[in-house]
């Protein structure tokens, strides 16, 4: 499967001018890099970071991206990632995620409801347990000595409901994990690279940023 990486660097003033004011507006703008696909499933991941002068948006996609509307020419770069990039045994990594756990919810009679409640986690021991579970599920192991957790500011957004014109507000809790990972199951690892890790991927979470180690 092909992978393409697109980098867009936008100054604060430009982002404000084109209405990029929360994670949902960035989510909608990223879709403009893939026009004429109104019914397509989302097959790309994004990550947004602040820089000294503005924002850096990374887009990893299965098809080439195009320059979004109102994006300056000199702010946009895209390239294909060679297949051998994903065949190394170990990588330095950075992973921005929205870590959550599902809590049991019971009705008034004490019976367990079918659907639980997603709750954000922020305690270090819970975060470490979370990333260890994800590593096992996605075919890699973590180097404990190199692993660090970096709390990020909460991300607030608002979006219109599909059923009415009212705005609904939401919040995501963000944590960045950095360190060294070792690939244990290449097929599962490739799946995590392609589809991301954790929840809220449409809002810029879950993309593995990798630097190969020989």
Image (tube, grey):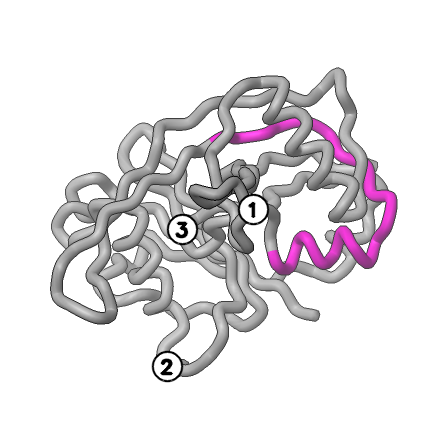
How crowded pointer 3 is (Cα within 10 Å; few <14, some 14-19, many 20+) is rated as: many
Element class at badge 3: helix
Span highlighted in magenta in the image: 175-195
Q: Which residue is drawn at the image coordinates 33% and 69% (left, top)? A: 32
- Does 18 sit above or below residue 95? below
Q: Nearer the viewer, mark 1 or mark 2?
A: 1
Q: CA distance from mark 1 to mark 3?
A: 30 Å
Q: Earlier in the sequence, mark 1 or mark 2?
A: 2
Q: Nearer the viewer, residue 39 or 119?
A: 119
| N-terminal-most mark, 3 or 2 | 2
Looking at the image, which residue is at 57% across and 63% down? 4
Mark 1 falls on what kind of element? loop
Above or below residue 66? Residue 103 is above
> From mark 3 to mark 2, how far is it between C-alphas?
18 Å
Write down the residue under mark 1. Answer: 112
Question: What residue is shown with label 3?
Answer: 203
Could you tell me which quadrant the N terminus lies in? bottom right
Q: Which residue is mark 2?
A: 38
């Amino acid at each position: 499967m092909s992978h393409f990486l697109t980098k867009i660097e936008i100054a604060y003033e430009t982002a404000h001018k084109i209405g990029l004011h929360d994670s949902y507006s960035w989510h909608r703008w990223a879709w403009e890099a893939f026009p004429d696909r109104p019914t397509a499933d989302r097959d790309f991941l994004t990550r947004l970071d602040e820089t000294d002068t503005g924002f850096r948006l990374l887009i990893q996609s299965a098809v080439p991206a195009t320059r979004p509307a109102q994006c300056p020419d000199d702010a946009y770069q895209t390239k294909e990632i060679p297949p051998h990039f994903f065949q190394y045994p170990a990588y330095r990594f950075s992973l921005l995620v929205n870590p959550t756990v599902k809590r049991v919810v019971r009705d008034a009679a004490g019976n367990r409801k079918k659907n639980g409640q997603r709750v954000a986690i922020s305690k270090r021991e819970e975060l470490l347990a979370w990333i260890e579970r994800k590593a096992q599920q996605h075919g890699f192991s973590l180097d404990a000595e190199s692993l660090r957790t970096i709390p990020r500011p909460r991300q607030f957004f608002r979006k219109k409901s599909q059923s009415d014109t009212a705005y609904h507000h939401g919040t995501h809790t963000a944590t960045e994990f950095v360190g060294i990972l070792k690939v244990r199951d290449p097929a599962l690892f490739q799946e995590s690279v392609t589809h991301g890790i954790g929840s809220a991927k449409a809002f810029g979470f879950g993309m593995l940023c990798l630097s190969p180690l020989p």
